[in-house]
Image: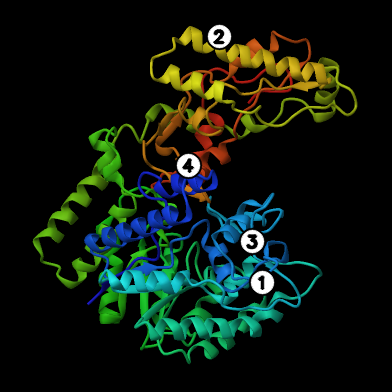
Amino acid sequence: MALAHNLGFPRIGRDRELKKAQEAFWKGELDEAGLRAVGRELRARHWQVQKDAGIELLPVGDFAWYDQVLTHSLTFGVIPQRFRSHDAARPTLQTLFAMARGAVGDSCCGGAHAQEMTKWFDTNYHYLVPEFTADQQFALSWEQLFEEVAEAQALGHAVKPVVIGPLTYLWLGKAKGGDFDKLELLDRLLPLYDQILNRLAAQGVEWVQIDEPILALDLPQDWKNAYERVYNILQRAPLKKLIATYFGGLEDNLGLAANLPVDGLHIDLVRAPEQYPTILDRLPAYKVLSLGLVNGRNVWRCDLEKALEVLRHAHERLGERLWVAPSCSLLHSPVDLDREDQLDAELHSWLAFAVQKCQEVALLAKAINAPHAADVAAALAQSQAVQASRAASPRIHKPGVQARLAAIKPADSQRKSAFAQRIVKQRAGLDLPAFPTTTIGSFPQTSAIRLARQAYRQGKLTEADYVDAMHSEIRHAVKIQEDLGLDVLVHGEAERNDMVEYFAEQIDGYVFTRFGWVQSYGSRCVKPAVIVGDLSRPKAMTVEWITYAQGLTSKVMKGMLTGPVTMLMWSFPREDVSREVQARPRGRGGAAPEGGRGAGGG
């Protein structure tokens, strides 16, 4: 019997309830009891949604008040001295939020800058970087994981706690107060993992998921050597351990991961399908293999028949040792497609958010366990129809765009004059000092700007009045820069709601959801655009605004464009063609040229 499980679920809520509660708490409009009540309600709802979808083993520990790595830091007592209370009391939610956001005034910490934040591997999610010292001590200081396990069990759920593995946790942190090898901390950290695993076993937990995504990286040899020693020590804990890898293939670490003394291994077959079937020949005969076949980082429906080809073959070799899952945690997916009420029927039929991805995982497992079930046959037929629809749709494949790309010649990418010639003309035309001053990016999006944009979109403000309002903001931005004596000016970007969304709204081939929110960090949620088909620019996007701004000054006015790679990486991309192919129309396509005088363009 194949088992359907999930690696993690979005914590924000389908209407961003967590974000709203966090921000109300920070403003003093909601007390801690109210905030915790929102968290409990979200966790209960999300567990039930996954169970209703057919997930048999539910993740616990994927919820975080700000960030899962920060949660682990509190759990391990990795709290920088500047956030520790004077009376050495245990950390509180105020401690957690101070570490994430900084502390001022009479808060728990008196005043301290926040911890560094950086990207979680190659995703657009950000985590709080643990700070380690050479004399770092670890102590179990935060009970959230155990409390949430008990919470889920009380609701009748079969659970699989999720923890970040010890080597990945150390890898993600930074050495502070002097240079030292973070691996030197390992022997001090491992007793806490042993303590955590034994406590979970005492709670009746059978399986625990230990995330070790750094196994998909090119690791130094000493870190590779540490893996076998770590898991030999941790195998004493009386529960079963599933090592989860994702965001890439194991490559040179495949043999290492397959032979760790644990009970199961998860691999990401979306980002690295070439790992299969090689993994079958390296996996010990007792070990569970979890195959991540549903994309946890995008919004498209899974090609169920294609995934089933892999699962059928795997089931012949593994039998009951086969598990099915998303490729990674669904943290990176919007919550529920059913919330979308303004997508056309065709596009709606192509998409899947976290709830629907759980249903796909469960359906794949059922297709192995009960291949002749009526609902399996119906789901497979629907999936085939969806894939055929996408393959033939004119909104995806546009002959005009393809013809323009095919007409591009290598010579089109070559300058027609040497740099030495160009730089003389540029300097003469721009007449800038040797070290010109300028500013990067937009001016602040004030409440007045946001209200004007909102009124315009709601039809309460005419287009002419909206343009007048934005022109007023541009005049203000230009005057400030001229008064400061800057040499190269910007127009302030008052008209732009977002550096990606503004352009995506004007490029044919992008679509937008209403509720496709994902967490970037803390309470910061973003709603990425979706690249549906070949991209083209029907008309100029910035020329009118920049032309107006340039007319206000004799100084150089820069044109400001978001680059094609950023547009691509901050969107949900297509899956039928490579990222390189998708970026090319954005960089090459278009109608009129963009930009301002001299310094701008593109």
| Picture quadrant of residue 154 | bottom left
Q: Nearer the viewer, residue 176 or 546?
A: 176
Mark 4 = which residue? 571
The label nearer to you, 1 versus 2, is 1
- Asked if residue 263 is positioned above or below residue 386 in the image, the reply reads below
Q: Position of residue 254 (x, y in %)?
A: 50, 76
Label 4 sits on a secondary structure element that is loop
Binning the other alpha carbons within 10 Å of mark 3 as few (below 14), some (14 to 19) or many (20 upward) gives: many
Binning the other alpha carbons within 10 Å of mark 1 as few (below 14), some (14 to 19) or many (20 upward) gives: few
In the image: residue 347, left or right of residue 332: left
In the image: residue 67, left or right of residue 573: right
Mark 1 = which residue? 88
The amino acid at mark 2 is Asp
Q: Nearer the viewer, residue 532 or 52?
A: 52
- Label 3, label 4: how many angstroms apart (C-alpha)? 25 Å
- Asked if residue 441 is positioned above or below residue 177 in the image, the reply reads above
| Picture quadrant of residue 190 | bottom right
Marks 3/1 in contact by CB < 8 Å: the verdict is: no
Marks 1/4 in contact by CB < 8 Å: the verdict is: no
- Label 3, label 1: how many angstroms apart (C-alpha)? 22 Å
Closer to the N terminus: mark 2 or mark 4?
A: 2
Closer to the N terminus: mark 3 or mark 4?
A: 3
